[in-house]
């Protein structure tokens, strides 16, 4: 069972999410929070597996809350995954939340089935990158104009996959675009992360986008 904390300042949105997600047998709503400060307190007391985090909230926004939760509660043995729920108007905030450790983002109008699947994938350690990734990446400052160590070791196939990751493609979309199996995609992503010494595909997307923007 995946334990969820819903964080949004609008009670109507929280009720809607709760009503939809409670239909999923493997998801359990353990609590709700109406701002970032409340979310931090609920994380400490409820120990959720995944937090669905709104961006714009009073008292403390979702970006600041994401930063503190990732710093305060995430260890090598325990990691709370944060999935940002956003709108197209929040690219800058989403980019900042990703830098602080969010596991990905989705738009608030994402169909329930896709949201539930994204929660499962994030819980397993995958990154969920929703639409508009290009705009999000534009908000992330480029710290270097040179490719990272290990970039020259990437094969043409790995570069193709990395380019699709940077565009926000899922493993299934990558497999369909390149006519390879999802297992092959996963194996290649593992090698890419290892060669570039990266934590997850979010970092890979950010690195790839900044390199190819230069």
Image (cartoon, rainbow, N blue to C red):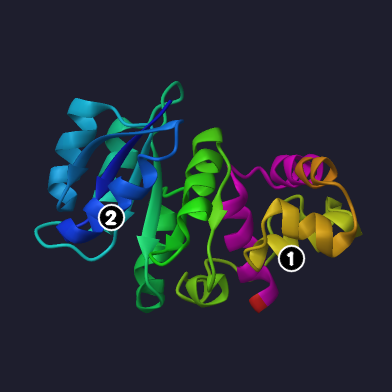
Observer able to see residue 64: no
Task: Choose between 210 and 112: the one closer to the eye.
Answer: 112
Q: Position of residue 22 (x, y in %)?
A: 35, 39
Residue at 86 percent across and 47 percent down: it is: 181
Q: Position of residue 145 (x, y in %)?
A: 63, 71
Task: Choose between 97 and 6: the one closer to the eye.
Answer: 6
- In the visual, does 136 lie left or right of 160? left
Task: Choose between 157 and 152: the one closer to the eye.
Answer: 157
Residue at 36 percent across and 78 percent down: it is: 89
Q: Which residues are magenta?
A: 187-212
User: What residue is disc 1 on?
Assistant: 163
Residue at 62 percent across and 45 percent down: it is: 198
- Report how far apart the C-alphas of labels 1 and 2 lie in the structure: 35 Å
* 208 inside magenta stretch: yes
The reply to whether dot 1 and dot 2 touch (C-beta < 8 Å) is no
On screen, 5 above or below 96?
Answer: above
Q: Specify the quadrant that holds the C terminus.
A: bottom right
Observer able to see residue 200: yes
Q: Position of residue 132 (x, y in %)?
A: 53, 74
Secondary structure of the residue carrying numbered label 2: helix
On screen, 95 above or below 37?
Answer: below
- In the visual, does 126 lie left or right of 71? right
* 142 inside magenta stretch: no
- In the visual, does 191 lie left or right of 72? right
Q: Quadrant of residue 205?
A: bottom right
User: What residue is disc 2 on?
Assistant: 16
| Labels 1 and 2: the sequence-earlier one | 2
């Amino acid at each position: 069972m995946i334990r969820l904390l819903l964080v949004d300042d609008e009670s109507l949105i929280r009720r809607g999410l709760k009503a939809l997600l409670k239909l999923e047998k493997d998801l359990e709503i353990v609590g709700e929070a109406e701002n970032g400060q409340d979310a931090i307190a609920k994380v400490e007391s409820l120990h959720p597996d995944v937090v669905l985090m709104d961006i714009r909230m009073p008292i403390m926004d979702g970006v600041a809350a994401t930063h503190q939760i990732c710093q305060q509660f995430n260890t090598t043995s325990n990691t709370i995954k944060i999935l940002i729920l956003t709108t197209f108007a929040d690219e800058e905030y989403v980019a900042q939340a990703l830098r602080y450790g969010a596991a990905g983002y989705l738009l608030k109008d994402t169909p329930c089935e896709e949201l539930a699947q994204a929660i499962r994938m994030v819980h397993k350690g995958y990154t969920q990158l929703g639409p508009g990734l290009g705009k999000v990446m534009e908000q992330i400052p480029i710290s270097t104009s040179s490719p990272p160590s290990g970039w020259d070791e990437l094969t043409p196939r790995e570069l193709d996959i990395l380019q699709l990751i940077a565009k926000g493609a899922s493993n299934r979309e990558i497999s369909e675009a390149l006519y390879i199996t999802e297992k092959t995609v996963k194996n290649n992503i593992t090698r890419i992360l290892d060669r570039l010494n990266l934590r997850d595909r979010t970092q890979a997307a950010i690195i790839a986008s900044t390199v190819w923007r230069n």
